[in-house]
């Protein structure tokens, strides 16, 4: 048999750090990048005698995610302890949810090259993150940073509904967009605030039973997710084809060598000895809270994309780019309130604004100018007050200084000359200076026309209205 | 000779302090002197903080001078079981694994005591991590019973009980997970009060079994126990299991007597293995309360015989998880010379924990393991519900339940050390109260022929501490147990 006789089955577990200001069970800051062990207190250090107190925002955020993904919200969910020893787990257990999670049974619709599939979400639960261990490769020492210990996480578990690495990557991108839209996660895979583990197995096409699965870890980009899953599918098929058996194990993706290697086998698997957390009462969620959260839900990526296509008449490709970031989409809409050519706004966003952000750094939220100023700039270009190329320079200046376009145009003398008399003077001068070229043109060599336009523009230092120049030249050259 | 001052109750002393007939410095000095005098024999204290206590006493005297006392107990020295975290003062839970640990914060109960002006004399001995019934599992030394130095004071809060009994201090705090304040109170002729689960904050108290642990005062009189509870029964947002309900005034109706009350005597508590002298004393106490106007009836708590097994699944299960943090990574003992992480863990914990702690960690780990969880932990939780229902059913007919606190009087040091099961059986009457989350007290109700104290246990409805205190006070009034001092 060949690889095409097999089907791969993939389920994903996503850990998303929640954008709460404080940790899940204490008041410490969740800010990334503080000096090691700076954002800690007796509670998240796991000192003797400390007790957890639940951050209510975490519950709201979990409900937000649950509602956005069509889950049912459990009225009474229970905290559990997951027991294991590791130096970056201060209490020797993680407070998480086990058999009674807050959200269950949702779906996420993905679209891979026009093939639309509904991926089922099994559950979403809340838990605390562990700290970070830093291993010194030379000295044999390990250092522990507990800033991350107690940062709230959502674990979002899919059913094994994904059939390829492309689907897996698309599921992750779509899920990330949803969480970013909800304002509960920053979607940063490199910093680890959006992480994923994959359960992968293969089976003969048409088979109903699942094959033995392995778990993949350490894939901190969409590219690594695709590579690691593809590698694993190929490895498992080759193994089965050669008469071997897939063993249950956890494998780490090696980003240096592009291979995965086993981390621990089933025999070393932890017995986490889950039991209900006695320090926290069961969590009761009221209908009123669920309704409150439902009312505060923002427009989600899919709905926004559909609306952008119909309301602004934009192509699917443009919409995808504009809606990738809810703040970019908001900025677009605000600009569109002051300027009616939506396609043109979209072009300026994609051609200029994103280029500037990319080249000079920054995000939509740190932009120095307002959407209304961009609308004013585009109107100036349309009115012929400045040329399109000057407009791009003005936008660059707005990006750097936040100054008004009119002020920049005035200060730089970029205003376009549309005075017919002034242009006529320049045209006459050029014609007078180039009798030879005039002769050629009149003899039928129409290509010379471009030369005249260029000369007039040069004479006018680039500020002449190109439409008027063309018109007058044609008239004078006859 | 004990200075007369030290025989006073906390509330008597309070009056004297208010009248400037004595000072906190004088009283605290007397306590320190008494400790100097007898603690080499009793060994109630792991650590005495003379400097801290005297500084607090001076501050208290200054407040009294300005008529700015922080409350009735301002200036009255107390002791703390070593389970309570005390900022800047070593706290070990009587375990080698925490030797040298200086907490950076005070437990909420400690904050409340300090906030009410009580000087903290020191940290008292206990069974390691409160796991034991004799204070012998302390990693440092056993405590002796002031009534007979060859015997244990009970446990696990044996140090607090002994210190209060032998007049080293006026009152103390302990913890009660399965009887750890009531049983030593019974064995030292003192008053131990385990409040309803959730009544006192557990924040800053080293956890043994989180769903059972409760901070508990111990004193020489019922009124003192009430006053101590009053000081610490405050809702604490740092403990999610702390009750938001406001505590009543525990002294307001404490003298109200038992006339009209209905008291139950559970038939299951008078079984084989109970010392006949204890049964006699408790039955006499019940009939005295009847003479004082209460109606005494027999009640049944049918699941009592499963309480011990239930407790020894749930408590060790929680302990196995609670004690995981003592891993040598951040504080306390770390084994030196270990090669690699696993070795560091196993060597640290092997060297740091004593045999009883290890036994319970193993019991608990087993009870929670995959494949055994349903048969042990889950079944124990179901039984816990039935035990609780037994009490709720009984409390439909009676206002409180009377029983012996312990089936035996104080036993010899070393007597039960090699027989863990015999040691566990000492708590057979006190465990059900914790499993049900109820308040319970032990008060002195007599002495054996050998001169050893006997305790009467009173169990009540959830948050009904005021009634327990009233019953206890009605009985206490008729006797002079609170005036009898041990021979030491």
Image (cartoon, helix red, strand yellow):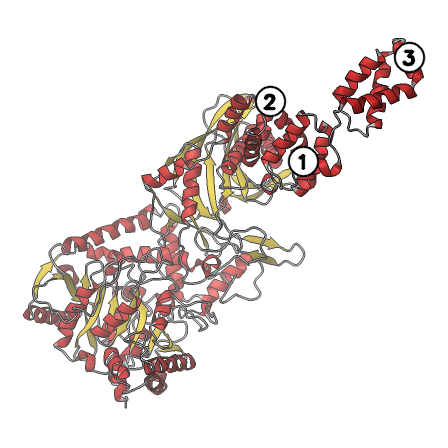
Within 10 Å of disc 3 (Cα), the crowding (few <14, some 14-19, many 20+) is some
Badge 3 sits on which subunit?
A
Which is nearer the N-term, disc 1 or disc 2? 2
Q: Which quadrant would residue A439 be assigned to in this image?
A: top right
- Residues indicated by labels 3 and 1 sit on the same polypeptide chain: yes
Q: Residue A162's x, y, as percent?
A: 51, 29
- Residues indicated by labels 1 and 2 sit on the same polypeptide chain: yes
The N terminus of chain A is located in which quarter?
Answer: top right
Q: Residue A308's x, y, as percent?
A: 53, 25
Nearer to us: label 2 or label 3: 3
Within 10 Å of disc 2 (Cα), the crowding (few <14, some 14-19, many 20+) is few
Label 1 to label 2, Cα distance in Å?
67 Å
The C terminus of chain A is located in which quarter?
Answer: top right
B125 versus A88 height, above or below: below
Which residue, as the protein is rendered here, is positioned at the far top?
Answer: A444
Camera-side residue of A286 and B19:
B19
Residue A2 badge: 2
Label 3 to label 1, Cα distance in Å?
42 Å
Give the SS element for disc 1: helix
Within 10 Å of disc 1 (Cα), the crowding (few <14, some 14-19, many 20+) is some
Which residue, as the protein is rendered here, is positioned at the far bottom?
Answer: B1
Q: Which residue is mark 3?
A: A440
Q: Which residue is mark 1?
A: A406
Q: Is residue A66 visible?
A: yes
Q: Residue A395's x, y, as percent?
A: 68, 35
Badge 2 sits on which subunit?
A
Residue at 59% x, 21% y is A315
Residue at 45% x, 70% y is B96
Give the SS element for disc 3: helix
Q: Are marks 3 and 1 in contact (CB under 8 Å)?
A: no
Camera-side residue of A286 and A451:
A451
């Amino acid at each position: 048999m060949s690889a095409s006789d097999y089907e791969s089955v993939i389920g994903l577990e996503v850990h998303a750090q929640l954008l709460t200001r404080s940790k899940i069970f204490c008041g410490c800051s969740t800010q990334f990048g503080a000096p090691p062990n700076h954002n800690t207190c007796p509670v998240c250090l796991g000192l003797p005698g400390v007790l957890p107190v639940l951050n209510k925002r975490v519950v709201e955020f979990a409900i937000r995610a649950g509602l956005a993904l069509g889950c049912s919200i459990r009225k009474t969910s229970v905290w559990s302890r997951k027991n294991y020893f590791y130096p970056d787990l201060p209490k020797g257990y993680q407070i998480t949810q086990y058999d009674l999670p807050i959200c269950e049974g949702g779906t996420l619709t993905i679209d891979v090259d026009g093939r639309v599939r509904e991926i089922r979400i099994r559950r979403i639960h809340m838990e605390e993150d562990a700290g970070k261990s830093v291993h010194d490769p030379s000295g044999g020492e390990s250092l522990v940073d507990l800033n991350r210990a107690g940062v709230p996480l959502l674990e979002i578990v899919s059913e094994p509904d994904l059939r390829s690495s492309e689907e897996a990557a698309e599921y992750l991108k779509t899920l990330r967009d949803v969480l970013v839209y909800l304002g509960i996660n920053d979607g940063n895979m490199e910093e680890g605030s959006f992480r994923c583990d994959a359960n992968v197995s293969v089976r003969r096409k048409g088979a109903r039973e699942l094959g033995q699965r392995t778990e993949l870890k350490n894939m901190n980009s969409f590219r690594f997710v695709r590579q690691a899953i593809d590698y694993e599918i190929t490895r498992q098929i080759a193994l089965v084809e050669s008469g071997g058996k897939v063993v249950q194990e956890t494998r780490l993706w090696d980003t240096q060598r592009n291979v995965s290697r086993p981390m621990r086998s089933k025999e070393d698997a932890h017995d986490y000895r889950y039991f209900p957390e006695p320090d926290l009462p069961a969590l009761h969620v009221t209908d009123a809270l669920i309704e409150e959260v439902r009312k505060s839900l923002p427009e989600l990526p899919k709905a926004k994309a559909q609306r952008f296509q119909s309301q602004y008449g934009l192509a699917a490709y443009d919409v995808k780019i504009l809606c990738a970031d809810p703040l970019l989409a908001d900025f677009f809409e605000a600009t569109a309130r002051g300027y009616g050519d939506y396609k043109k706004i979209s072009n300026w966003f994609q051609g200029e604004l994103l280029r500037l952000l990319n080249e000079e750094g920054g995000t939509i939220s740190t932009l120095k100018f307002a959407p209304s100023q961009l609308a004013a700039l585009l109107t100036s270009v349309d009115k012929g007050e400045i040329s399109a190329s000057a407009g791009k320079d003005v936008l660059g200046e707005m990006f750097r200084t936040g100054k008004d376009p009119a002020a920049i145009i005035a200060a730089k003398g970029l205003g376009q000359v549309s005075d017919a008399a002034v242009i006529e003077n320049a045209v006459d001068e050029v014609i007078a200076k180039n009798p030879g070229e005039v002769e050629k043109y009149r003899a039928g060599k129409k290509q010379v026309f471009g030369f005249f336009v260029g000369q007039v523009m040069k004479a006018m230092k680039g500020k002449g209205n190109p439409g008027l120049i063309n018109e007058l030249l044609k008239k004078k050259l006859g | 000779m004990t200075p007369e001052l030290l025989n006073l109750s906390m509330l008597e002393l309070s009056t004297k302090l208010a009248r400037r007939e004595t000072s906190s410095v004088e009283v605290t000095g007397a306590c320190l002197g008494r400790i100097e005098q007898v603690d080499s024999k009793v060994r109630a204290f792991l650590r005495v903080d003379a400097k801290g206590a005297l500084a607090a006493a001076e501050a208290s005297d200054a407040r009294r001078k300005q008529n700015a006392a922080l409350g009735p107990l301002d200036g009255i020295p107390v002791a703390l079981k070593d389970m309570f975290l005390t900022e800047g003062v070593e706290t070990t839970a009587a375990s080698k694994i925490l030797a040298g640990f200086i907490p950076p914060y005070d437990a909420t109960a400690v904050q409340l005591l300090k906030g009410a002006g009580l000087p903290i004399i020191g940290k008292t001995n206990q069974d390691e991590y409160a796991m034991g019934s004799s204070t012998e599992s302390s990693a440092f030394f056993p405590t002796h019973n002031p009534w007979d130095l060859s015997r244990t004071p009970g446990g696990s809060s044996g140090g607090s009980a002994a210190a209060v009994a032998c007049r080293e201090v006026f009152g103390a705090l302990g913890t009660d997970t399965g009887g750890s304040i009531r049983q030593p109170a019974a064995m030292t002729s003192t008053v131990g009060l385990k409040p309803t689960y959730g009544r006192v904050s557990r924040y800053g108290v080293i956890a043994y079994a989180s769903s059972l642990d409760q901070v508990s005062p111990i004193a020489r009189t019922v009124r003192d126990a009430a006053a101590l509870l009053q000081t610490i029964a405050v809702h604490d947002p740092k403990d999610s299991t702390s009750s938001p309900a406001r505590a009543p005034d525990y002294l307001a109706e404490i003298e109200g007597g038992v006339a009209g009350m209905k008291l139950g005597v559970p038939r299951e508590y008078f079984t084989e293995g109970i010392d006949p002298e204890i049964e006699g004393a408790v039955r006499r106490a019940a009939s005295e309360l009847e003479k004082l106007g209460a109606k005494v009836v027999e009640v049944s708590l049918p699941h009592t015989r499963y309480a011990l097994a239930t407790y020894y699944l749930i408590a060790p299960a929680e302990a196995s998880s609670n004690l995981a943090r003592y891993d040598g990574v951040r504080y306390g003992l770390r084994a030196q010379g270990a090669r690699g992480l696993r070795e560091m863990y196993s060597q640290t914990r092997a060297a740091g924990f004593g045999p009883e702690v290890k036994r319970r960690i193993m019991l608990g780990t087993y009870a929670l393991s995959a494949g055994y969880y349903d048969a042990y932990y889950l079944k124990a939780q179901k039984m816990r519900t039935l035990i609780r229902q037994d009490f709720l059913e009984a409390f439909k007919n009676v206002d409180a339940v009377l029983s012996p606190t312990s089936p035996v009087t104080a036993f010899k040091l070393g007597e039960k050390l090699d027989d863990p099961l015999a040691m566990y059986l000492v708590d057979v009457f006190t465990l059900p109260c914790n499993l049900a989350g109820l308040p319970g007290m032990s008060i002195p109700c007599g002495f054996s022929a050998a001169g050893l104290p006997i305790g009467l246990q009173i169990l009540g409805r959830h948050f009904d501490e005021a009634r327990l205190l009233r019953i206890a006070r009605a009985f206490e009034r008729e006797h002079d147990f609170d005036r009898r001092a041990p021979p030491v």
